[in-house]
Amino acid sequence: MSFPKQFLWGGATAANQFEGGYQEGGRGLANVDICPSGSDRSAIICSHLKTFTCDEHHHYPSHDSVDFYHHYKEDIALMAEMGFKVYRMSIAWTRIFPNGDEEEPNEEGLQFYDAIFRECQKYHIEPLVTIVHFDCPMHLIQTYGGWKNRKMIDFYLRLCKVLFTRYKGIVKYWLPFNEINMILHAPFLGAGLYFEDGDDEERIKYQAAHHELIASALATKLAHEIDPENQIGCMFAAGSVYPYSCHPQDVFEALKKDRESYFFIDIQARGAYPSYAIKELTRKHCMPHMEDDDNAILKKYPVDFISFSYYNSRCVSGQKEPEKLTEGNLFASAKNPYLTYSDWGWPIDPLGLRITLNHVYDRYQKPMFIVENGLGAIDTVKADGTIEDDARISYLREHILAMKAAIEEDGVELMGYTAWGPIDLVSASSGEMKKRYGFVYVDKQDDGSGSMQRIRKKSFYWYKSVIESNGECL
Ligand code: BG6
């Protein structure tokens, strides 16, 4: 047996990294719009904000991005040409509710997504919709403090209700939050959180996380009530954590690090705070405040499937800080000497994907969906206009082989695979354009120049044949 017949092959994007048009169609300002590219970005996405506005000294990549807002027909046609069965995309919250707390949605914003789904339908591409992919209306942040405030649950559910109702029968797969565990690592980007002097940041993050977890459970309830066909998945930034050595302290540290992420999925998939978290959070005085029926809500509405992004594995030591540190999807990690690294220093570990798939499946026994994977790299357009991105092909081939082995040899249940950024888009961690993931090159450069022309890379034809052969031609 190889990939199941109905396996969902495709690609994934996020509104703030892809759409642009940040002031068009009545769209309001979001946290992602005040995150610049360049050296100041990382402090801001990690909540060290000095201001809530944009200035003329910085470039803000979400503002025009790669202009999917005006290129969506061409872009979805390119996805269709590759044979996509599924397109994972996200809704820009501020297109639907520009401030976030209005009673009525912005019709123009809804019409934009109507048009996108129409294009998908035209090519029989199933949409997989992330409701919140790192965006939060600035008005909700400035007026209510973002997800640290419980009122966010109601604003978010209002958005969900509008989406589930409007797109009933059109969208079946929904992800309430992208990389829900990112709230711990990049809280402004992940949840619109900012901190003031003297704040207990850890406590605030877990309180905000609790609100998102309740929101996710109630969104699951609502989705099923509005259309029993709906399938809801949690989504986390995955990548198993390896011990730096077989020293028991390293092994235990790795287990604890993994639990930092599994904490969220334990709640979304199993429906209860895990005992290790209750102990740890209580010890640290970070156990969130809960309302009377919160535990019942979490128990009653677990997700239907588990989705995750996988870029790399991680590595930790419990003894002393290992000398060499590296980055991978905003997670610091000890440098694993057995792996090679991307140009951005992210480890490359295809077997790690098989290990992660097995860990997640062993733990939850629910269908899984890999909703992000890929290699961020520099691409060069040759004089004849072609782009030979062999390193990307090799990265993806090895990861698809690992996923195939997990299905065939280990028996994990996998619904689909969406490669990250099938059409070049802006990097979330760095805000750069030159960190490209796509099968399609976009002529847009870091200084904002470029014609936005789309050019098929070598990997475009390769991925097309992967999909055509249902993963046999690799
Ligand atoms: C994930 C995010 O963290 O990784 C995406 O869900 C992001 O939004 C992707 O783009 C790759 O990271 P980066 O920093 O290379 O864009």
Image (cartoon, grey):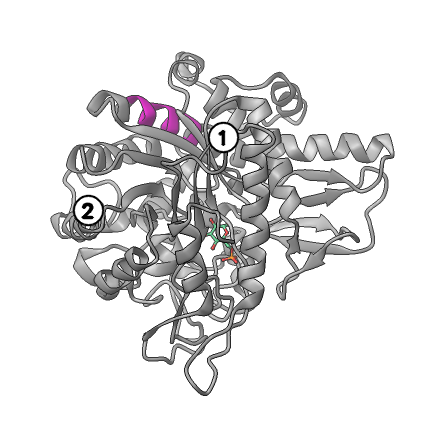
| Residue 130, image x, y percentages | 35, 42
From what the image shows, is residue 449 above or below residue 38? below
CB at mark 1 closer than 8 A to ligand 1?
Answer: no
| Residue 243, image x, y percentages | 77, 38
From what the image shows, is residue 295 above or below residue 426? above
Q: Indicate which disc, 1 or 2, sits on the residue closer to the N terminus.
A: 2
Q: Residue 38 shows which numbered tag?
A: none
User: In this rendering, would 163 be left or right of 349?
Assistant: left
Q: Nearer the viewer, mark 1 or mark 2?
A: 2
User: In this rendering, would 284 be left or right of 25?
Assistant: right
Q: CA distance from mark 1 to mark 2?
A: 40 Å
| Residue 254, image x, y percentages | 73, 35
* Residue 310, picture quadrant: top right
User: Would residue 198 be seen by someone viewing this image from the given angle?
Assistant: no
Which residues lie in the magenta part?
Answer: 212-221
Task: Report the front residue among 365 and 458.
Answer: 458
Residue at 48% of width from left, 57% of height from top? 428
Task: Report the front residue among 261 and 122.
Answer: 122
| Residue 283, image x, y percentages | 68, 22
Give the secondary structure at mark 2: helix
User: Would residue 111 be seen by someone viewing this image from the given angle?
Assistant: yes
**Crowding near the residue tagged with mark 1, few <14, some 14–19, many ≥20 C-alpha atoms within 10 Å:** many
Q: Residue furthest bottom?
A: 383
* Amino acid at the residue labelled 2: Gln
Task: Return the residue at label 1.
Answer: 207
From what the image shows, is residue 388 above or below residue 400? below
From what the image shows, is residue 296 above or below residue 165? above
Task: Report the front residue among 415 and 97.
Answer: 415
Task: Return the residue at label 2.
Answer: 121
Q: Would you say residue 381 sits in the magenta stretch?
A: no
* Amino acid at the residue labelled 1: Gln
* Residue 391, picture quadrant: bottom right
